[in-house]
Amino acid sequence: MIQRNRPDPDTQTWMARGLADVAERPDYVLTPRAFPDIYAAYFGFVWRCLRGLGVPERLLDDAAQDVFVAVHRRLTEFRGDSSLRTWIYGIVRHVALNQRRGERRHGGVMEFASEPASLAPDPHERAQDGEAAEFVATFVAALDEKKRDVFVLALLEQMTIPEVAETLGVPLNTAYTRLRAVRQEFAKALAAQGER
Amino acid sequence: MSELDSEEEQILARARRAFAPSDADAARVLRATSLALGLPVSGAVSSSANANAGANTSASASGGANATAITGAAKLSPLTAAAGKWLAGLAVVCAAAGGGYVYGFRAGREVSQREAGSAVATTATPASATLKPSSAPPIPSVAARALSASASVATASATEPQQSAAGEAAVTRDAPPTRSLSARPPAAASPPAHAQSLQAELRALRRVESLLREGNAEVALRVLAQLDRDFPRGQMLEERAAAWALARCTRARSDEVTNDFNQRYPGSVYAERVLAACAAPAAISLDNRPEAP
């Protein structure tokens, strides 16, 4: 079990921290009673990860719903073998993957995904956020699955590399290698964008 | 992260901000999820208590299983401040391609399928144990009312412990999308009428929200008119009225619309959004703009 050395942005309330802590206990069995807490603590994480993993905005509701339906139904199976966030991310990945497969099967409408709407108060800021998000979404869509996971967890979710390694179930060195590669690709893509 | 230069960091920070969900997103998905799971919840919630949700949650809760149900629901509000922001971002005006009715909102379909197919083994916890919005005012009214409405949907969600998460997703993914606002499922597999109404309302309001974000008020108004025709006595009338007001004011600002809305729904969480959309530009103060996440 890997110790968190930095609080998750979604789990900064006592409630979420407490939930994460108990979820770390190997003998802890979560019940559907905990679902509202889990929803509250991890909705942002789920939503952002789904977006980062390329689920188009118009399908986000369905995808997030799929994730939480699965979380609710499988909650009693969670035994603390991993952190709750890791466990949820596994579900998020499956759902995102199925979304992408479904999109391809039904004619590939990914290209029509609307640009994410920022909540920034200033319209100019919002527009810039939207452009950045579009750039990132395009970049992520071109990555292979392994790098995409690392990009989403390490660079978008700002998880530590040990956490990323644990979440993905890969050796630490592998996670570092993938991160290095994806950073280089990101920098290259940004430079190429700047030249246009 | 130190290997990234400042421009790269900035792009990532902006993307993070754009990827963040709004409070309305959280409420809407909770509502749909609850509906799909048949989570029974009772009690309506005063929406005006949303503002201090975070403080209340942190201060009053003291741990334990009984408290978590309440605080979990309450935490929804601080996700991004106020449920009234569900239509934030109206400034984005694009030449939206003619709004096809392609937004698949599967909650209804799933519910009807599960109701038809499932027999017992409910995983839903008792209402009092799952969510107690009446004890926890901070939950956004949108979510609270959805949960309240879904309470009467006696849906038994089958437990499938052997099914993997991937399988779970695949099942739902294979469900054909629901298309028409007025589509009515076959009687044999159909959920109760009020559940159908709620699903249709949710579907329509999501579509309206999307249309308004694109600045497409005309189509939004048509969707709302269709919704009124199909379900004149819905369960989300306040949201519907807010959507009407926002759509009208997107087309042409009008104080009359604001006044009418405020009279019908005094103290509504949507009042601020309606005011921001309807008041003349000079009258809008910075305080009325959506807050940063």
Image (spheres, rainbow, N blue to C red):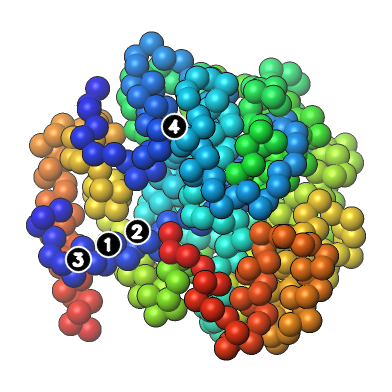
User: Quarter holding the C terminus of chain A?
Assistant: bottom left
Whether residues under marks 1 and 3 lie with C-beta atoms below 8 angstroms apart, the answer is yes
Are the residues flagged by discs 4 and 3 from a single subunit? no
Q: What's the residue type where badge 1 is placed?
A: Leu
State the residue lying farthest toward the top.
A27
- Answer few, some or many: residues within 10 Å of disc 3's Cα (few below 14, many 20 plus, some between 14 and 19): some
Q: Is B285 displayed left or right of B117 in the figure?
A: left
Q: What's the residue type where badge 3 is placed?
A: Glu
Q: Which residue is mark 2?
A: B16
Helix, strand or loop at disc 4?
helix
Q: What's the residue type where badge 4 is placed?
A: Met
Between the residue at mark 4 and the residue at mark 2, the CA separation in whole angstroms equals: 24 Å
Image position of A72 with respect to A184: above or below? above
Between the residue at mark 1 and the residue at mark 3, the CA separation in whole angstroms equals: 6 Å
User: Quarter holding the N terminus of chain A?
Assistant: top left
Label 3 vs 2, first from the N-terminus: 3
Q: What's the residue type where badge 2 is placed?
A: Arg
Between the residue at mark 4 and the residue at mark 3, the CA separation in whole angstroms equals: 33 Å
The percent position of residue B244, horizontal first and vertical second, equals: 76, 71
- Which residue occupies 75% across, 33% down? B42
Whether residues under marks 1 and 2 lie with C-beta atoms below 8 angstroms apart, the answer is yes
